[in-house]
Amino acid sequence: MCGLIGYIGNNAVASTLLSGLKNLEYRGYDSAGIALNDNNMIDVFKAKGKLENLKNLLETQSAKLGSSHIGIGHIRWATHGKATTENAHPHLSNDGKLVLVHNGIIENYQELRRQLQAEGFVFHSETDTETAVHLIDREYKKSHSLEQAVISAVKLLRGAFAFCIMHQDEPDKIIAVRKNAPLIIGIGNNENYIASDIPAIIGKVSGIIHLADNELAIVRQDSVEVKKLSGEPVIKPIEKIEFSPDVISKLGYKHFMLKEINEQPNILRQCLAAHIPAVDQPVSLDECTISLDFTKIKNISIIACGTSLHAAAFAQNLWEEWLHLPVHIEAASEYIYKHNLTDENSLVIGISQSGETADTITAVKQAQEKGAQLLLLTNRTDSSITRYSENVIPLNAGIEVSVAATKSYTAQLAALYWFGLYWAEQISSLSQGQLQAIKQSLLELPALAEEVLSHSADIKALADKLKNYHNFVYMARGINLTCALEGALKLKEISYINANAYAAGELKHGPIALLDENMPVMAILGSGITLSKMISNCAEAKARNAPLIAVASEKEDLPLDLFDYLIKIPGASHGIFPILANLPLQLLAYYIADGLGREVDQPRNLAKSVTVE
């Protein structure tokens, strides 16, 4: 769960690497480092904490930076070993001639470490990565070829890895190799890049090459050669970068998260323009290729992690009502280690914003092996997860820079909504009147979302009143529970306030013991059969002196004296309401975190792409 970059060209390497790493900060990290191959020696510079610390270090070491034209860089999110300078990447061989950076986890590193130590190699860190350095170095001393050494060494590794590797004695190249971890090559004008994700090289290259698993690239200043680990050459297409440099610009907003929250109405508008042409026309697949056999599906499993799991819960509520099929949702990290009943009668849906979520990818693989039909939702159609099925729904939310998901979550909800309607049309489980009413409410959503966001000043004022509480309870019923879960998660992620969500009816079965004047309760009051029960649950919380906040439709006649604070949003159908209600909860979490001085876009301990299990 790291970001890496390599560069070979004519630009100042240290500043080029720092610039690329700056654009990868959204992945989450706790240390940073670069290595330069200059004047027949490898120089490594590392610092704990933010990139600014590394930048300051480099300013004090400017005499050592030389005129290098080749280097690699890394930001690390700690897995094996604490966040220390010693554990930061890059890592060096004992003779100081070989250096590498790594994204992923080497599962058999302990076994290899013991073997290498017995052979005389000395370890200076607690990381699994250093095992790979010494392993490649051992093989290099046999072959005196960096390419052959890498091929021999990585065949001994189990787990996930993306490596950039340099050797002092071969200063004209960087070796890049991957397995189960993303890695791309950026093609420039007499310069080339290697990166773990596109933002690192946006605006710097004319095209990219996506490395596949078990492929190795020899990257020189004027050429890129790709091979399989067998040594067989591979002809790779050079693809155009579809993203504008604006995606990594805040465009005047204080944080990327606030920018991305405000992008949501347009994302919804684009989604609906592509898939809901009119209320009296069938749902359009647009660029999606869906070849599912709906007649064989007897049960649905939706597998995801974090925010994507909350989107799965939203689909569960809608689809069981619309499709009359059982929908099971499960955290991918649980699915992969249990005996599950997935078979050829199952549709397994994997949701991953990045398309690189290791647990979700593993779960999808297992479902594929059991003969299930697969459907994948991702914001990155160039990602690893898309290799497992042709049935892919692109979220088309654009690159999301802030670690906390906002616009990608809304894009997931919209995609699950329109696809559920498409499925209902295929099996005729909803009448034409029902379909038209649902489509009409969906087409109104972008304008309603804009209206909600137009009241951000009111949410900011509320945040100022709530930011000093240390604990929150969120509660809801039915389809709105997913909104409570996601709202609580956002507050936890970026403000570090303990917030927990509960089905409101379960509050009195234990959590109500927590309630007092220091425990605000956030209630999400959607319309429908649960509204009266929710009001009763709110009264129970109020009776325990808990400050009571609610998100509710402006059309509902509520006992206003019950609530300390009321966030009103436009009236909407029960399926649309939680999409709208999520928006003020995102803003509330944002303004509380910002008011507390948190690092909103890069909260501690979190990474955007969770590429390890």
Image (tube, rainbow, N blue to C red):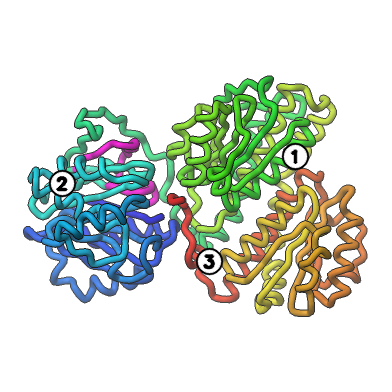
Mark with earlier residue (3, 1) = 1
Specify whether residue 174 is painted magenta.
no
Residue 12 visible, this angle: no
Report the Cα–Cα distance between label 3 and label 2. 38 Å
Instruction: From this view, report whether residue 452 is shown above or below residue 58.
Output: above
> Which tag is nearer the camera, tag 3 or tag 1?
1
Specify whether residue 215 is painted magenta.
yes
Residue position marked by numbered label 2 in the rendering: 173
- Number of numbered discs overlaid on the protein picture: 3
Question: Where residue 360 sits in the image (x, y, percent)?
Answer: 52, 43
Name the residue rendered at 88%, 54% in the picture. 531
> Which tag is nearer the camera, tag 3 or tag 2?
2
Asked if marks 2 and 1 touch (Cβ < 8 Å), the reply is no
Amino acid carrying label 2: it is Lys
Instruction: From this view, report whether residue 186 is shown above or below residue 260.
Output: above
Asked if marks 3 and 2 touch (Cβ < 8 Å), the reply is no
What kind of element bears circle 1?
A: helix
Which sits in the foreground, 580 or 523? 523
Report the Cα–Cα distance between label 2 and label 1. 53 Å
Which sits in the foreground, 545 or 272? 545
Residue position marked by numbered label 3 in the rendering: 600
Name the residue rendered at 39%, 50% in the picture. 199
Question: Where residue 583 sits in the image (x, y, percent)?
Answer: 68, 56
* Span of residues in magenta: 194-219
Name the residue rendered at 57%, 42% in the picture. 351
Question: Where residue 303 sits in the image (x, y, percent)?
Answer: 59, 42
Residue position marked by numbered label 1 in the rendering: 318
